[in-house]
Image: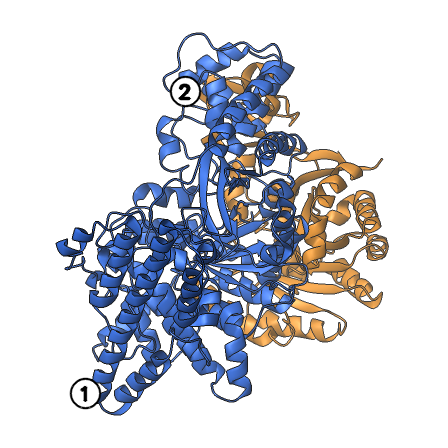
């Protein structure tokens, strides 16, 4: 039985493809986007999450840790992340639920058992399962098995992807995926590499390969104020869209500082700085993007 | 700068509720302004106590209770103040303050609510037909008591006729005293009223006026009936008028809007006393579904009602739409669009499930198909039912068994295993159910006005509270089931399976309200998947308790001529009396916390979103619960934004139907907005929320109720 590392399963997801869906977040991503919304999904292995507000400072975690990462000092809990190997021994004993291991190794059947519970909602709304991440293509065999298993139960599969994987990956995934939500972060190769840490060309090649193979694709463009929402880029995007006539639609995704807020829970450092931009300026850019791209934005998800 | 017209300012504040929702504007400006005035409380604040009484001389005859009650109705018809407002398109107003307090003016008799009267039949035969029916019955052999009752019905009709006669006279005077558009409007009101409700209506406008007159007269006399199936009653009239070119859809919508505006005639605006909320006069409306013959009812009136609610956002008529697997997508999307505006005004019934369980309970199929509700959501047969319910607190039953009553002391009881604990709980439940099924109808009060509009009171020549109706139902209603089941789940695992502590130690902790046991309490809350998380173990425990309760109640279908259909409700008692005496629960709650409402998860315990909540809720066999129950879902507006959001709401409803639920109310509301409304009530005068079976304007709820609404779990995307 194939196994993979999953960091969340979110039921009643309704902005990750059509209808009511269950989104399975697979861990691990080759990109390191400055604005990442799910920074806990970047590394391949589990992470220890600590929500201070839930901590009772009871000290149950102190003897649980084989490496002495926890201590109670002056009645307050303290965590030394440098010693933590994310084994999860402390989380299993934490009474308040302050400590949690994020990123569990699960079998295909275990994931599908959760997904299948909402089958009646998928039928009622045209929904299904969505694989997200992280980059689901990073766990290609696991992702393939999940999609095959879901399809065997009549559940449709959507994949959110950054498009960053070896070419063969998407050829294989296209056979079991009903729709790709393909994120494109930048159109300028240098900027793309600066913001994401990975080159643009292979991603564009994968996009074209999927497109030419007849896969259903919605192109999604995260707009991050001051980073990739410059107006000159709109023409480049339009040129790209015009070269991909089979695209289902284009969606613009708004940036939320949600990911930045999560960093502390996981003891992570920001991947890169997101420059603060005056609301008015960002809003004006957003309006311009929407206006220029409205011909391709067939869905109000282009919001 | 041009000063804004006051009416314009009022209107701007009146309908807005959820920022970002595109305002709808289909109604004429004059109608919108009248609605704004009604919502601001102009008419509600003009209510006065009756300034007349039953004269002493009347009592020289030593009248019977029926005669006294009928005389009160007659005098109200003769003397209650009229209110005719310039520009309104329907006549009739319930102007007495006692009525808005659910008291019968002029007498101390109990007023009636929790039923929906037979307005459909009343429209079919008019007061004329009812009078003939009574006289025909009087022509048969009758006892003195029967004669007394039937004659009181005739006096009631005299009162209604007087009320009508006075309106006709006043409108005639106004026609003569006015000119132009005002005169034309008044004349149209007069013409629509002249022949009804004495005679059956011929047009949509007459039917609407007649329905208002029937309904508003019972409420003027202090009773709070539901309205019932308005589209079934009025749709055929509108269809005919539209086909004959007598009316346009726009005009019909406007007339319906005036019905809705009149429906908030008791709204007191800023003058309302904070409490359990205004707009809860049980004036429920049912839309769509099938008729007695099994044909679909939905018609132009169905759509127009939704249009009016969408535009004016009047929550005084809570609406339940009967849906099924056959309901077209178009209607479900329309319902979702209105639900998404917030206010919890529109809920849904899964009609096939309900009709099957009513039929299985013993109602004839034609009656089962015509089900409506009592003014909240309990399933009843409209126009044929005297209804009441007996609350049974299952959680208190469990707490008693555990020695956790407020007054209990001494050593807690000992149970060798979980089965024996459950058996004791069930025995306690049997005691509670016995008490409920042995209860009679609460009162032998006279209710001639109500009896007039409930089958088969005339035929049996017996009153509403005297087994006159076709059906008298006193429904045993369980409450606290989710929390009882969650507590049992914890006790079974911690005490009997893991043996982490003896039951006596747990009981001592609960008696001490979890003092110094925060780690255990919090670990229970964070580790257990409780009811509402689609968890097999939790749902199985709920089912075990549910089956025990419905099995007990189901074994007594009828006693003393009174039906005993099982139901499950809290109706806000989770906010009031339950909190006062309740000690801590094994499921990790402190004494006095707000626990589960109706058959919904306990606030804060459902973590997996609405699909999991719906699956848990539907994990029981609702065929065993003919009186019904409610699922309250609260969803953030952002979650259901856009077309995808509408698809999702339609999907939730369709799945709820497929999974066999009964009644679901979806409140689309933002916690942040409610918090703001708590601090700045003046900004949100018409912000409505679903409370339980009713909606209320948030500003009229007291702090406790507001907290309950806010803390009901938000279902949101991460």
User: Please, which chain is the residue tagged with disc 1 on?
Assistant: B
Q: Quadrant of residue B253?
A: bottom left
Pick the front one: A76 or B372: B372
Residue B686 left/right relative to A189: left
In front of the other: A37 or B132: B132
Q: Nearer the viewer, residue B72 or B647?
A: B72
At 44% across and 67% down in the image, what residue appears?
B122
According to the picture, the residue beneath numbered tag 1 turns out to be B177
* Residue ID at (55%, 86%): B243
Question: What is the quadrant of residue A184 in the picture?
Answer: bottom right
**Is label 1 in contact with label 2 (beta carbons under 8 Å)?**
no
Regarding residue B21, the answer to whether it shows in the image is no
Outermost residue, top direction? B411
Dot 1: element: helix
Rendered hue of chain B is blue
Q: Residue B356 appears at what percent x and percent y?
A: 65, 50
Residue A139 drawn at (x, y percent): 78, 44
Q: Is residue B70 left or right of residue B16?
A: left
x and y, in percent, of residue A2 in the image = 83, 37
Question: Which mark, by number, is residue B405?
Answer: 2
Residue at 65% over, 35% down: B535
- The residues tagged by marks 1 and 2 sit, at their Cα atoms, a distance apart of 69 Å
Q: Residue at x 60, y 23 (%)?
A: A83
Q: Identify the image's colour scheme: rainbow, by chain, secondary structure or one colour.
A: by chain
Q: Secondary structure at mark 2?
A: loop
**Does residue B167 appear in the picture of this structure?**
yes
Along the polypeptide, which appears first: circle 1 or circle 2? 1
Chain A colour as displayed: orange
């Amino acid at each position: 039985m194939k196994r993979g590392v999953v960091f969340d399963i979110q039921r009643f997801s309704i902005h990750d493809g059509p209808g009511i869906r269950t989104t399975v977040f697979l861990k691990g991503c080759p990109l390191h986007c400055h604005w990442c919304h799910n920074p806990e999904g970047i590394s391949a292995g589990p992470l220890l999450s600590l929500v201070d507000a839930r901590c009772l400072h009871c000290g149950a975690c102190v003897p649980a840790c084989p490496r002495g990462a926890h201590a109670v000092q002056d009645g307050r809990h303290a965590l030394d992340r440098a010693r933590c190997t994310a084994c999860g021994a402390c989380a299993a004993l934490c009474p308040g639920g302050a400590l949690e291991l994020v990123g569990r190794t699960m079998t295909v059947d275990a994931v599908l058992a959760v997904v299948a519970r909402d089958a009646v909602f998928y039928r009622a709304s045209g929904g299904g399962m969505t694989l997200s991440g992280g980059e689901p293509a990073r766990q290609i065999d696991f992702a393939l098995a999940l999609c095959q298993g879901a399809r065997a139960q009549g559940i449709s599969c959507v994949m959110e992807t950054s498009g960053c994987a070896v070419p063969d990956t998407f050829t294989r995934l296209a056979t079991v995926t009903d729709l790709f939500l393909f994120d494109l972060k930048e159109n300028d190769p240098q900027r793309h590499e600066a913001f994401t840490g990975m080159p643009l060309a292979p991603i564009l090649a994968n996009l074209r390969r999927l497109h030419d193979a007849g896969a259903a694709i919605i192109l999604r463009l995260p707009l991050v104020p001051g980073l990739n929402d410059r107006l000159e880029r709109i023409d480049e995007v339009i040129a790209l869209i015009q070269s991909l006539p089979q695209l289902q639609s284009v969606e613009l995704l708004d940036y939320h500082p949600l990911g930045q807020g999560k960093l502390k829970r996981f003891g992570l450092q920001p991947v890169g700085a997101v420059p603060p931009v005056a609301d008015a300026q960002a809003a004006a850019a957003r309006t311009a993007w929407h206006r220029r791209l409205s011909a391709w934005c067939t869905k109000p998800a282009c919001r | 700068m041009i000063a804004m017209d006051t009416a314009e300012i009022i209107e701007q504040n009146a309908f807005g509720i959820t920022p970002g929702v595109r305002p709808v504007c289909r109604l004429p400006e004059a109608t919108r302004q009248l609605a704004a005035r009604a919502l601001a409380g102009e008419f509600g604040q003009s209510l006065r106590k009756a300034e007349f009484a039953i004269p002493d001389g009347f009592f020289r005859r030593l009248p019977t209770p029926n005669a006294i009650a009928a005389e009160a109705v007659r005098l109200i018809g003769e003397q209650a103040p009229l209110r005719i407002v310039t520009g309104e398109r329907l006549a009739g107003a319930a102007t007495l303050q006692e009525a808005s307090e659910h008291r019968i003016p002029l007498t101390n008799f109990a007023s009636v609510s929790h039923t929906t009267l037979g307005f459909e039949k009343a429209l079919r035969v008019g007061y004329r037909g009812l009078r003939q029916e009574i006289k025909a019955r009087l022509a048969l052999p009758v006892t003195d008591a029967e004669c007394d009752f039937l004659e009181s019905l005739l006096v009631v009709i005299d009162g209604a006729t007087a009320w009508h006669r006075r309106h006709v006279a006043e409108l005639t005077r106004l026609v003569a005293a006015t000119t132009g558009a005002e005169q034309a409007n008044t004349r149209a009101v007069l013409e629509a009223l002249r022949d009804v409700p004495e005679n059956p209506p011929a047009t949509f406008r007459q039917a609407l006026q007649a329905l208002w007159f029937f309904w508003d007269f019972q409420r003027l006399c202090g009773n709070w009936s539901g309205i019932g199936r308005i589209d079934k009653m009025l749709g055929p009239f509108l269809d005919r008028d539209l086909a004959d070119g007598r009316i346009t859809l726009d005009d019909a919508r406007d007339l319906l809007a005036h019905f809705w505006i009149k429906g908030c005639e008791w709204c007191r605006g800023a003058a309302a006393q904070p409490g359990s909320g205004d707009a809860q006069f049980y004036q429920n409306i049912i839309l769509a579904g099938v008729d007695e013959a099994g044909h679909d009812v939905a018609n132009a009136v169905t759509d127009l009602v939704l249009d009016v609610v969408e535009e004016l956002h009047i929550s005084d008529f809570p609406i339940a739409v009967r849906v099924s697997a056959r309901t077209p997508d178009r209607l479900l999307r329309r319902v979702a669009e209105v639900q998404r505006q917030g206010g919890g005004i529109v809920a849904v019934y899964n009609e096939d499930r309900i009709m099957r369980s009513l039929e299985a309970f013993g109602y004839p199929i034609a009656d089962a198909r015509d089900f409506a509700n009592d003014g909240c959501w309990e399933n009843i047969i409209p126009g044929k039912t005297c209804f009441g319910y007996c609350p049974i607190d299952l959680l208190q039953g469990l707490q008693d068994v555990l020695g956790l009553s407020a007054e209990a002391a001494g050593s807690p009881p000992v149970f060798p295993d979980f089965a024996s604990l459950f058996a004791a709980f069930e025995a306690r439940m049997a005691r509670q159910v016995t008490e409920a099924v042995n209860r009679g109808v609460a009162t032998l009060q006279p209710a001639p006005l109500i009896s007039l509009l409930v089958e088969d009171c005339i035929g049996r020549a017996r009153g509403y509270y005297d087994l006159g109706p076709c059906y008298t139902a006193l429904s045993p209603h369980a409450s606290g089931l989710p929390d009882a089941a969650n507590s049992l789940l914890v006790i079974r695992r911690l005490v009997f399976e893991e043996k982490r502590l003896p039951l006596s130690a747990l009981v001592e902790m609960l008696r001490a309200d979890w003092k110094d046991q925060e780690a255990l309490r919090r670990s229970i809350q964070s580790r257990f998947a409780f009811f509402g998380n689609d968890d097999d173990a939790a749902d199985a425990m709920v089912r075990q308790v549910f089956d025990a309760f419905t099995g007990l109640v189901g074994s007594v279908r009828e006693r003393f001529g009174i039906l005993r259909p099982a139901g499950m409700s809290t109706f806000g008692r989770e906010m009031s009396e339950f909190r006062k005496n309740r000690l801590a629960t094994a499921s990790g709650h402190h004494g006095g916390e707000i626990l589960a409402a109706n058959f919904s998860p306990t606030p804060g315990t459902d973590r997996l979103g609405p699909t999991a909540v719906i699956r848990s809720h539907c994990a029981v066999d609702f065929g065993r619960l003919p009186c019904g129950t409610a699922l309250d879902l609260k969803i953030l507006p952002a979650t259901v934004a856009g077309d995808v959001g509408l698809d999702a709401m339609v999907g939730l409803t369709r799945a709820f139907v497929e999974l066999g639920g009964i009644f679901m109310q979806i409140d689309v509301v933002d916690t942040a907005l409610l918090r703001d409304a708590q601090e700045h009530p003046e900004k949100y005068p018409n912000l409505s929320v679903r409370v339980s079976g009713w909606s209320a304007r948030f500003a009229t709820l007291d702090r406790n109720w507001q907290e309950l609404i806010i803390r009901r779990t938000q279902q949101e995307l991460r």
